[in-house]
């Protein structure tokens, strides 16, 4: 069951600079301007007059500096010479203006801008539809996002979940909406509206965590397509039982690529070309069209038909079942990419 909206953790999107870094820069600039103003007034203290006791001490100049750069003064200490008044008009006044701009800019960023950003992200959170959730932004998750973007997926349609702040910051810098937390928890997946997602890609780093994420995601999103990466072959069946539609074993796949090198120098290259969007050919899965029903599989594809999926059955182009396409069949074909 989805959590009440008020309890959903907020999404975040790309920030231009780390918040504390920006604060420290502003503090440094403000202190530098105050020190500059103090130095100018101290060097020209002979042009000032104290209307209280007639003496100007170090603390008097420090007090006059702070009052002058933040307000227009109280009249207890005033410039009396022409040079002192010119310094106040052309040097101290610009410093005062810059300081106020820093104060107002900081207030805008931490009050108005943050409030606006929170409202905007909540609005994005409400409007998430047919998006792709990447649970785990390690090496595999980052590569998955790169391939999605290269394949034409908009960055606004990708949401990243991870427990590591550095990984979250990397995804945020790329422009994706992010949420820091454990993807195996109901409230985190509910926050990204996994029930409305088209695809959930799980690469949590540990097989037990990945299977738990799949189990939670399938519970919340019965209709979403879930793909998971597992490293131990014994856990592939567990991942499928948990609800994964696609189970990928990177270790086994790497071994298969290495083994194909014994069958020819270019076999592995071609397989790698198939699975990346930057190659000259690509695998595409689609539903059979109405005008293709009744025709042989090998005669209907723009590229090269390699498989026919009919319910739970899988047929190659040479099987008798592939000589007649039926309504509802899924066709897997190799087609040229835009680069070809």
Image (tube, grey):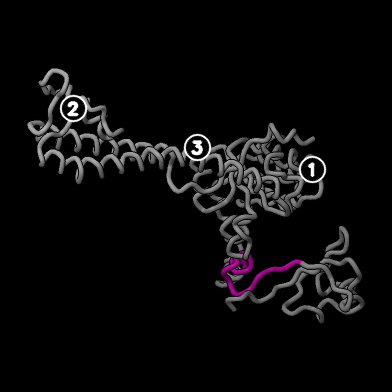
Q: Which label lies toward us, 2 or 1?
A: 2
Compare residues 173 and 305 and report the one nearer the observer: 173
Q: Which residue is mark 3?
A: 111
Q: From the top left corner, tell me how far across and down residue 17 is, in percent.
A: 43, 45
| Label 2, label 1: how far apart the Cα atoms are | 81 Å
Q: From the top left corner, tell me how far across and down residue 242 is, in percent.
A: 77, 41
Q: Which label lies toward us, 2 or 3?
A: 2
Label 3: how many Cα within 10 Å (few below 14, some 14–19, many 20+): few
Label 2: how many Cα within 10 Å (few below 14, some 14–19, many 20+): many
Q: Are marks 2 and 1 in contact (CB under 8 Å)?
A: no
SS category of the residue bearing label 3: helix
Q: Earlier in the sequence, mark 2 or mark 1?
A: 2
In the displayed structure, 243 sits above or below 146; it is above
Label 1: how many Cα within 10 Å (few below 14, some 14–19, many 20+): few
Q: Which residue is mark 2?
A: 77
Rendered image quadrant of residue 47: top left
Q: Which residues are magenta?
A: 271-285
Q: Are marks 2 and 3 in contact (CB under 8 Å)?
A: no
Point out the image quarter for the C terminus. bottom right
């Amino acid at each position: 069951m989805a959590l009440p909206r008020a309890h959903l953790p907020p999404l975040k999107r790309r920030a231009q600079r780390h918040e504390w870094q920006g604060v420290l820069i502003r503090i440094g600039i403000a202190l530098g301007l105050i020190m500059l103003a103090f130095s100018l007034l101290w060097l020209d203290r002979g042009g000032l007059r104290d209307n209280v006791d007639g003496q100007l001490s170090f603390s008097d100049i420090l007090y006059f500096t702070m009052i002058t750069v933040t307000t227009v003064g109280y009249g207890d200490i005033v410039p009396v010479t022409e040079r002192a008044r010119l310094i106040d008009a052309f040097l101290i006044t610009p410093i005062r203006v810059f300081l106020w701009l820093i104060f107002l800019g900081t207030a805008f960023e931490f009050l108005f801008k943050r409030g606006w950003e929170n409202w905007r992200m909540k609005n994005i959170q409400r409007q998430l539809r047919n998006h792709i959730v990447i649970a785990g932004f390690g090496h595999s998750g980052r590569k998955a996002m790169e391939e999605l973007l290269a394949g034409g997926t908009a960055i606004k349609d990708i949401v990243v979940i991870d427990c590591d702040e550095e990984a979250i910051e990397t995804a945020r810098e790329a422009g994706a909406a992010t949420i820091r937390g454990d993807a195996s928890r109901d409230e985190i997946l509910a926050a990204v509206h996994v029930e409305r997602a088209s695809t959930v890609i799980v690469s949590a780093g540990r097989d037990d965590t990945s299977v738990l994420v799949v189990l939670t995601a399938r519970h919340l999103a019965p209709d979403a397509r879930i793909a998971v990466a597992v490293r131990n072959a014994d856990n592939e069946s567990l991942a499928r039982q948990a609800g994964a539609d696609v189970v990928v074993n990177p270790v086994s796949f790497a071994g298969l690529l290495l083994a194909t090198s014994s069958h020819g120098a270019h076999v592995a290259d071609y397989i790698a070309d198939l699975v990346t969007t930057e190659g000259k050919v690509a695998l595409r899965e689609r539903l059979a069209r109405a005008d293709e029903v009744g025709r042989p599989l090998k005669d209907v594809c723009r590229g090269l038909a390699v498989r026919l999926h009919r319910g739970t059955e899988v047929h190659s182009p040479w099987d008798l079942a592939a000589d007649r396409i039926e309504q509802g069949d899924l066709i897997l074909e190799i087609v040229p990419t835009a680069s070809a």
